[in-house]
Image (cartoon, grey):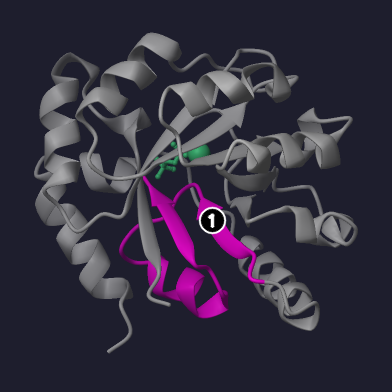
Amino acid sequence: MNPLLSVSMLSSDFGNLARDVQAVNQSLADWFHLDIMDGLFVPNISYGFPVVEAIAKQAQKPLDAHLMIVDPDRYVDRFKTMGCSCLSIHYEACTHLHRHLQHIRRLDMKAGVALNPHTPVELLEDILDEADFVLLMSVNPGFGGQHFIPRTLTKIARLKEMILKKHLSCLIEVDGGIDAINAPSVVKAGADIMVAGHALFKEGDVKAAIESFKNNTQPL
Ligand code: DX5
Ligand code: ZN
């Protein structure tokens, strides 16, 4: 499968949100990545329901919501109602991860487990078959525009090996600090989906930045 690009709207211009959503609609990007932060699980507050609804109204590609919040299960139904197709919740934020992943799947969304940089992928041994994808954080969650943590590459490779050994179809999404330069090594390590925000929006012409990102990461 060709690697997918999920565009993090955290770095978009909220004063021109409709314009930026349209630019992503018209680009080669695959998904919209929506970062939800509560100021508790992570030391930052991003945006909430009204902004997700505004994006959902205009978006013509699947919505991939990443919940960086405590007790994420409280809002699973709400994200379904708002039109999300993929929903990831943090391993570190869930006492009953198994139940919550089943809840997401029951609502016909793709269920993702997100891992902070310090959490080993081996902890997923007994939960991997309940997840449609694993989101590996390649920065500490909370902020856009940080530097990629190189150690993530070995985590991706170790997780890929676990998935293959178990004959699962679980995908690997990698999130944080990805740009056109490091993206090929992220794909080579085994990533199926890459999230990028800052690297795309800082260019000004987000559509062109997405095009060159995609061209850099597709197999020849
Ligand atoms: C960080 C978020 C990421 C981030 C990715 O907490 O989960 O999705 O916005 O954006 P960049 O590409 O700016 O690191
Ligand atoms: Zn994210």
Q: Residue at x 40, y 69 (%)?
A: 3
- Quadrant housing residue 48: top left
Q: Give residue 13's position: percent from left, percent from top.
A: 21, 24
Choose between 159 and 177: the one closer to the eye: 159
User: Across the whole image, how many numbered discs are drawn on residues?
Assistant: 1
**Number of other residues with Cα within 10 Å of mark 1, as a class: few under 14, some 14 to 19, many 20 or more:** many
* The N terminus, quarter of image: bottom left
Residue in the picture at 76% in, 34% down:
100
Type of the residue with mark 1: Val
**Residue nearest the viewer, comparing 73 with 45:** 73
- The quarter holding residue 102 reads top right
| Placement of 206 over or under 171, stated as above or below | above
Check the picture and name the quadrant holding the C terminus.
bottom left
From this viewpoint, which residue is outermost toward the bottom? 220
Judged left or right of residue 135, residue 81 is left
Q: Which segment did they paint magenta?
A: 169-196
Q: Position of residue 140 (x, y in %)?
A: 62, 38
135 left or right of 207 in image: right
Q: Position of residue 66 (x, y in %)?
A: 54, 35
Q: Within 8 Å of ligand 1, the CB of disc 1?
A: no
Q: Kindly identify the residue that appears in the image at 27 percent across and 18 percent down.
A: 54
Q: Is residue 186 above or below residue 29?
A: below
Residue 64 rendering spot, x and y as whole percentages: 45, 41
Q: Which residue is mark 1?
A: 174
In the figure, residue 62 lies in which quadrant? top left
Element marked by disc 1: strand
**Residue plotted at (63% across, 56% down):** 132
Q: Is residue 181 magenta?
A: yes
Q: Is residue 85 visible?
A: yes
Residue 144 appearing in the image: no
